[in-house]
Image: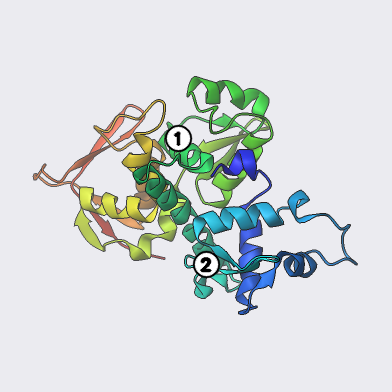
């Protein structure tokens, strides 16, 4: 499924609102009922579900297992297997957990698509490309300036025009893969998966060999998986851990969330590369998982 080409109005924020509503309605809701629930006639001008984020977000959510449809004429929508009701509590912590679940579903669904011979979603491949970028590279928010970067990377099949770029960067921002910055007064976007990785720290081993720890991290955040990166038009070098994952590990170590350890045993070591700086890490320890 292509999010950006077919369902460009879909968003993680809309999916969260929809899932919270469905979580409070165990019997499910038709799209007409959802539209009435989420778009009260007295508050906003009425639009069709296709003209809003409602239907596109339902379709994307269905693809990701966050919502499911049953019956026909009309379909009844309810929560899917990947939308645990515990994720739907209205709190910052649970909101982050929901977005983490969405990010995991995007990546795991893409890997399942690869295994079945199906083309992964454009957003999944776009996020895999984004995470593999040099974290010191700053990308413009405007498509007119970002277009050359996308075309040089041969990623226009995933992110192809001025309508898709802002929606793609919105997905990346919401799911914890972007650091917003400025040079002068010019807003820029930096690849940075620190927030996404921090959200899954409680589920990672407290202390493990670096290659095993990173394998677990890539299972929890599959857009970081080498399996997706290998399918990019310009795959990254796998001889080292680079991109925004290397940046995230160093940032989390700097704020004492994890510890990057080096020992004489090189069999389990990985090389983290940031720019021209390499660091050999043999073990990773979680110091604080909150």
Q: Is residue 265 left or right of residue 59?
A: left
Out of 288 and 235, give the one closest to the viewer.
235
Can you see residue 251?
no
Could you classify mark 2 by the number of other residues whose Cα lies within 10 Å: few (under 14), some (14-19), or many (20 or more)? some
Could you classify mark 1 by the number of other residues whose Cα lies within 10 Å: few (under 14), some (14-19), or many (20 or more)? many
Rendered position, 150 above or below 200: above
Q: Are marks 1 and 2 in contact (CB under 8 Å)?
A: no
Residue tagged 2: 80
Q: Residue at image x 76%, y 64%?
A: 35
Q: Residue at image x 36%, y 29%?
A: 235
Residue tagged 1: 129
Can you see residue 96?
yes
Give the x, y percent position of residue 91: 59, 71
Q: Is residue 208 left or right of residue 88?
A: left
Give the x, y percent position of residue 60: 58, 53
Give the x, y percent position of residue 16: 61, 62
């Amino acid at each position: 499924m292509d999010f950006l080409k077919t369902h460009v109005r879909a968003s993680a924020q809309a999916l969260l609102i929809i899932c919270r509503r469905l979580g409070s309605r165990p019997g499910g809701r038709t799209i007409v009922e959802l539209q009435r629930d989420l778009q009260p006639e007295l508050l906003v001008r009425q639009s069709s579900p296709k003209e809003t984020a409602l239907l596109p977000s339902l379709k994307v959510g269905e693809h990701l297992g966050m919502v499911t449809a049953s019956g026909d004429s009309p379909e009844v929508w309810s929560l899917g297997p990947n939308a645990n009701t515990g994720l739907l509590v209205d709190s910052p912590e649970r909101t982050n957990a929901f977005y983490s679940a969405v990010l995991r579903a995007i990546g795991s669904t893409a890997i399942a698509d690869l295994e079945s011979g199906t083309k992964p979603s454009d957003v999944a491949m776009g996020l895999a490309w984004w995470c593999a970028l040099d974290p010191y590279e700053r990308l413009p928010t405007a498509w007119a300036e970002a277009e050359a970067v996308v075309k040089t990377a041969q990623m226009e099949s995933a992110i192809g025009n001025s309508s898709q770029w802002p929606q793609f960067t919105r997905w990346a921002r919401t799911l914890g893969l972007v650091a917003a910055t400025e040079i002068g007064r010019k807003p820029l976007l930096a690849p940075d998966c620190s927030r996404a990785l921090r959200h899954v720290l409680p589920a990672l081993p407290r202390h493990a060999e670096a290659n095993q720890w990173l394998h677990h991290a890539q299972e929890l955040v599959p857009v970081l998986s080498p399996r997706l990166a290998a399918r990019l038009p310009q795959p990254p070098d796998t001889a080292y851990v680079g991109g925004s994952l290397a940046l995230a590990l160093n940032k989390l170590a700097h704020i004492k969330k994890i510890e990057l350890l080096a020992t004489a045993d090189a069999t389990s070591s990985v090389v983290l590369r940031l720019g021209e700086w390499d660091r050999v890490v043999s073990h990773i320890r979680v110091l604080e998982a909150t």
